[in-house]
Amino acid sequence: MSEERGESERAGDLAEEELVAVARGVKTRGLRGEIVAELLTDFPERFEGLERLIAVGPDGERQTLELEEHWFHQGRVVLKFAGYDSIEAASALVGCEFTVPESERVELEEDEFYDWELEGCQVETIEGEQLGRVREIMRTGGVEMLVVDNAKGRDYLIPMAEEICVRIDIEAKLIRVDVPEGLLEF
């Protein structure tokens, strides 16, 4: 599932809680200081009822912004923040990630995971052989693939199928796999 985890860097009085990115500012729009943002969430409905977002600039600086209104246009979200009433003011938000605290992320079903929860997990076979760490999740249009960095400097592509990924323990950062013969051969 998509909601990208942001960096947790200290800035001013803002809490050090981990953040989850829900949008990224790409350009200004109109004369009132609106900003067009790329959606980074599979849950666009989450913008309903949101009163504030935390903007994280390219330098990691955090700023809490009051969300006055939002709407969707051509697969993106248009955001209007209080105090940003001109193109010039809104241009400062281009390149920022708009985030919410991790505690406010959308809760998933028991067998669903965010990409950032899987990234960094150690992957091992059911026999205990260490395969490497998950670098990213590759979306193929079908079954997602775990891209696993191995010690040999090559990647394993492991399908996220239930019969292959037999145990996913996010707390322990461990994924146990039952790999079919030939899947790990180069």
Image (cartoon, rainbow, N blue to C red):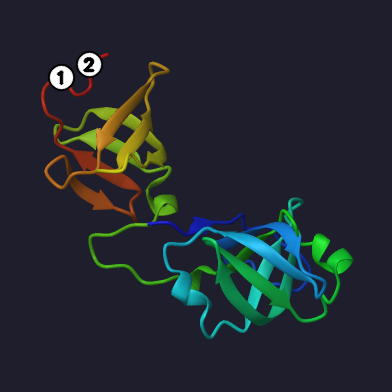
In the displayed structure image, the side of residue 183 where residue 118 appears, left or right: right
Q: Is residue 52 visible?
A: yes
Q: Residue placed at 37% from the left, 33% from the top? A: 147
- The amino acid on which the numbered mark 1 sits, given as a three-letter code, is Gly
Estimate the x, y position of residue 15 in percent, counting from the top left.
66, 72
138 on left or right of 10: left
The quarter of the rendered structure image containing the C terminus is top left
Q: Position of residue 101 (x, y in %)?
A: 56, 71
Classify residue 140 by image quadrant: top left
Tell me if residue 97 comes above or below residue 141 in the rendering.
below
Q: Which element carries disc 1, helix, strand or loop?
A: loop
Name which quarter of the figure residue 13 lies in. Answer: bottom right
The residues bearing labels 2 and 1 have C-alpha atoms spaced at a distance of 5 Å
Front position in the image: 12 or 81: 81
Would residue 169 be found to the left or right of residue 136 on screen?
left
Relative side of 52 to 149, left or right: right
Q: Which residue is mark 2?
A: 185
Name the quarter where the N terminus is drawn: bottom left
Image: 148 above or below 2: above
Q: Nearer the viewer, residue 62 or 11?
A: 62
Callouts 2 and 1 close, C-beta under 8 Å: yes
Q: Kindly identify the residue that appears in the image at 80 percent across and 72 percent down.
A: 33
Give the farthest residue toward the right.
88
- Local packing at callout 1 (Cα closer than 10 Å; few below 14, some 14-19, many 20+) is few
* Place of residue 62 in the rendered image (x, y in percent of width and height, measured from the top left): 73, 65
| Disc marking residue 98 | none
Residue at 37% over, 43% down? 121
Q: Position of residue 94 (x, y in %)?
A: 75, 57
Residue appearing at x 40%, y 51% in the figure: 115
**Kind of residue sitting beneath label 2:** Glu
Helix, strand or loop status at disc 2: loop
State the residue position of label 1.
182
